Image (tube, grey):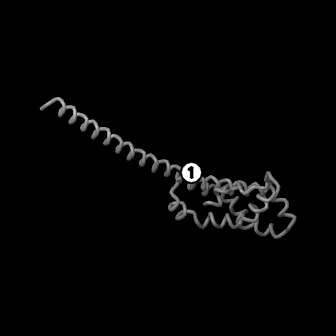
Amino acid sequence: MSAEWVTAVASAGTFVVIAASAIAALIQLRHSRGSNQIIALNECRETLESTEFRDAQRFVSYELPKRLRDPAECKKVAQLPFVGEYEAIATVANFFESMGLFVKSRIIDRHIACDFWSYIVLRNWNALLPVTTYVRQALHTEALWENFEYM
Protein backbone atom coordinates (compact mmCIF):
# COMPACT_ATOMS: atom_id res chain seq x y z
CA MET A 1 0.00 0.00 0.00
CA SER A 2 1.41 3.36 -1.00
CA ALA A 3 1.75 6.38 1.26
CA GLU A 4 -1.01 8.17 -0.61
CA TRP A 5 -3.48 5.38 0.21
CA VAL A 6 -2.51 5.39 3.87
CA THR A 7 -3.00 9.17 3.98
CA ALA A 8 -6.39 8.87 2.22
CA VAL A 9 -7.59 6.14 4.59
CA ALA A 10 -6.37 8.13 7.62
CA SER A 11 -8.18 11.23 6.31
CA ALA A 12 -11.37 9.25 5.78
CA GLY A 13 -11.07 7.78 9.28
CA THR A 14 -10.56 11.24 10.74
CA PHE A 15 -13.64 12.48 8.86
CA VAL A 16 -15.73 9.61 10.26
CA VAL A 17 -14.58 10.34 13.82
CA ILE A 18 -15.29 14.07 13.48
CA ALA A 19 -18.72 13.39 11.92
CA ALA A 20 -19.59 10.96 14.72
CA SER A 21 -18.50 13.53 17.31
CA ALA A 22 -20.65 16.20 15.67
CA ILE A 23 -23.66 13.88 15.62
CA ALA A 24 -23.12 13.00 19.29
CA ALA A 25 -22.87 16.71 20.15
CA LEU A 26 -26.15 17.44 18.34
CA ILE A 27 -27.87 14.62 20.18
CA GLN A 28 -26.51 15.91 23.47
CA LEU A 29 -27.73 19.44 22.67
CA ARG A 30 -31.18 18.05 21.91
CA HIS A 31 -31.26 16.26 25.26
CA SER A 32 -30.04 19.42 26.99
CA ARG A 33 -32.81 21.43 25.29
CA GLY A 34 -35.35 18.86 26.49
CA SER A 35 -33.99 19.14 30.00
CA ASN A 36 -34.22 22.95 29.89
CA GLN A 37 -37.79 22.66 28.64
CA ILE A 38 -38.70 20.37 31.54
CA ILE A 39 -37.21 22.88 33.99
CA ALA A 40 -39.11 25.79 32.38
CA LEU A 41 -42.37 23.83 32.31
CA ASN A 42 -41.96 22.93 35.96
CA GLU A 43 -41.26 26.56 36.92
CA CYS A 44 -44.38 27.68 35.06
CA ARG A 45 -46.47 24.98 36.69
CA GLU A 46 -45.20 25.92 40.17
CA THR A 47 -46.01 29.57 39.58
CA LEU A 48 -49.48 28.80 38.25
CA GLU A 49 -50.20 26.65 41.31
CA SER A 50 -48.93 29.16 43.86
CA THR A 51 -51.47 30.78 46.16
CA GLU A 52 -50.34 34.31 45.28
CA PHE A 53 -50.72 33.69 41.55
CA ARG A 54 -54.09 31.95 41.92
CA ASP A 55 -55.38 34.92 43.92
CA ALA A 56 -54.06 37.34 41.30
CA GLN A 57 -55.70 35.31 38.52
CA ARG A 58 -58.98 35.20 40.39
CA PHE A 59 -58.94 39.00 40.69
CA VAL A 60 -58.01 39.50 37.01
CA SER A 61 -60.45 36.95 35.61
CA TYR A 62 -63.49 37.58 37.76
CA GLU A 63 -63.28 40.87 39.69
CA LEU A 64 -61.50 43.12 37.18
CA PRO A 65 -64.09 42.78 34.37
CA LYS A 66 -66.80 43.95 36.80
CA ARG A 67 -64.72 46.96 37.85
CA LEU A 68 -63.91 47.95 34.29
CA ARG A 69 -67.60 48.69 33.68
CA ASP A 70 -66.99 51.92 35.63
CA PRO A 71 -65.18 54.59 33.54
CA ALA A 72 -63.42 55.96 36.63
CA GLU A 73 -61.88 52.56 37.28
CA CYS A 74 -60.72 52.38 33.65
CA LYS A 75 -58.76 55.60 34.17
CA LYS A 76 -57.20 54.21 37.36
CA VAL A 77 -56.12 51.06 35.58
CA ALA A 78 -54.45 52.98 32.75
CA GLN A 79 -52.00 54.62 35.17
CA LEU A 80 -48.73 52.89 35.92
CA PRO A 81 -47.46 51.52 38.19
CA PHE A 82 -50.35 49.39 39.33
CA VAL A 83 -51.05 49.83 43.02
CA GLY A 84 -53.10 48.01 45.62
CA GLU A 85 -55.32 45.30 44.27
CA TYR A 86 -54.37 46.29 40.75
CA GLU A 87 -50.87 44.87 41.31
CA ALA A 88 -52.51 41.54 40.45
CA ILE A 89 -52.69 42.79 36.85
CA ALA A 90 -48.91 43.09 36.65
CA THR A 91 -48.43 39.75 38.38
CA VAL A 92 -50.57 37.90 35.87
CA ALA A 93 -49.61 39.82 32.74
CA ASN A 94 -45.87 39.73 33.45
CA PHE A 95 -45.96 35.99 34.11
CA PHE A 96 -47.71 35.29 30.82
CA GLU A 97 -45.33 37.74 29.12
CA SER A 98 -42.45 35.56 30.31
CA MET A 99 -44.23 32.38 29.30
CA GLY A 100 -44.89 33.84 25.84
CA LEU A 101 -41.22 34.70 25.51
CA PHE A 102 -40.27 31.12 26.43
CA VAL A 103 -42.65 29.83 23.76
CA LYS A 104 -41.58 32.36 21.13
CA SER A 105 -37.89 31.59 21.70
CA ARG A 106 -38.66 27.85 21.66
CA ILE A 107 -37.52 27.16 25.21
CA ILE A 108 -40.99 25.70 25.71
CA ASP A 109 -42.61 23.90 22.79
CA ARG A 110 -45.71 25.82 21.66
CA HIS A 111 -47.81 22.67 21.27
CA ILE A 112 -47.06 21.60 24.83
CA ALA A 113 -47.77 25.09 26.19
CA CYS A 114 -51.05 25.32 24.29
CA ASP A 115 -52.12 21.83 25.38
CA PHE A 116 -51.39 22.67 29.02
CA TRP A 117 -52.47 26.27 29.35
CA SER A 118 -54.51 27.53 26.38
CA TYR A 119 -57.68 28.02 28.42
CA ILE A 120 -55.90 29.82 31.27
CA VAL A 121 -53.92 32.05 28.92
CA LEU A 122 -56.95 32.94 26.84
CA ARG A 123 -59.16 33.62 29.87
CA ASN A 124 -56.55 35.98 31.35
CA TRP A 125 -55.79 37.65 28.00
CA ASN A 126 -59.48 38.37 27.43
CA ALA A 127 -59.84 39.75 30.95
CA LEU A 128 -56.77 41.96 30.51
CA LEU A 129 -57.42 43.09 26.94
CA PRO A 130 -59.18 46.32 27.99
CA VAL A 131 -56.35 47.10 30.43
CA THR A 132 -53.76 46.34 27.77
CA THR A 133 -55.54 48.65 25.35
CA TYR A 134 -55.80 51.50 27.89
CA VAL A 135 -52.18 51.25 28.97
CA ARG A 136 -50.85 50.91 25.41
CA GLN A 137 -52.78 54.06 24.48
CA ALA A 138 -51.49 55.90 27.55
CA LEU A 139 -47.89 54.89 26.79
CA HIS A 140 -48.28 55.40 23.02
CA THR A 141 -46.79 51.99 22.30
CA GLU A 142 -47.89 48.57 21.13
CA ALA A 143 -44.93 46.93 22.87
CA LEU A 144 -46.65 46.21 26.17
CA TRP A 145 -47.17 42.50 26.88
CA GLU A 146 -46.57 41.56 23.25
CA ASN A 147 -45.25 38.11 24.20
CA PHE A 148 -48.37 37.53 26.27
CA GLU A 149 -50.35 38.48 23.17
CA TYR A 150 -48.21 36.08 21.10
CA MET A 151 -48.97 33.32 23.56
- Left or right of 126? Residue 81 is right
Q: Secondary structure at mark 1?
A: helix
Residue drawn at x 63%, y 66% is 122
Please identify the quarter of the rendering in which residue 59 is found. bottom right
Q: Which residue is at a point 76% across and 65% down the rendered structure image?
A: 130
In the picture, measured across the screen, residue 3 lies left or right of residue 88, that is left
For badge 1, the amino acid type reads Glu
Closer to the camera in the image, 59 or 143: 143
Q: Quadrant of the N terminus?
A: top left
Residue pushed farthest top?
A: 3
Q: Is residue 13 left or right of residue 120?
A: left
The number of callouts visible is 1
Percent position of residue 4, x then y: 19, 31
Closer to the camera, 27 or 93? Answer: 27
Say whether residue 88 is visible: no
In this view of the protein, can residue 94 be seen by the observer?
Answer: yes
5 or 124, nearer to the observer = 5
At x 54%, y 60%, the residue is: 113
Q: In the picture, residue 137 is in which quadrant?
A: bottom right
Can you identify the residue that label 1 sits on? 43
Q: Residue at x 14, y 30 (%)?
A: 2
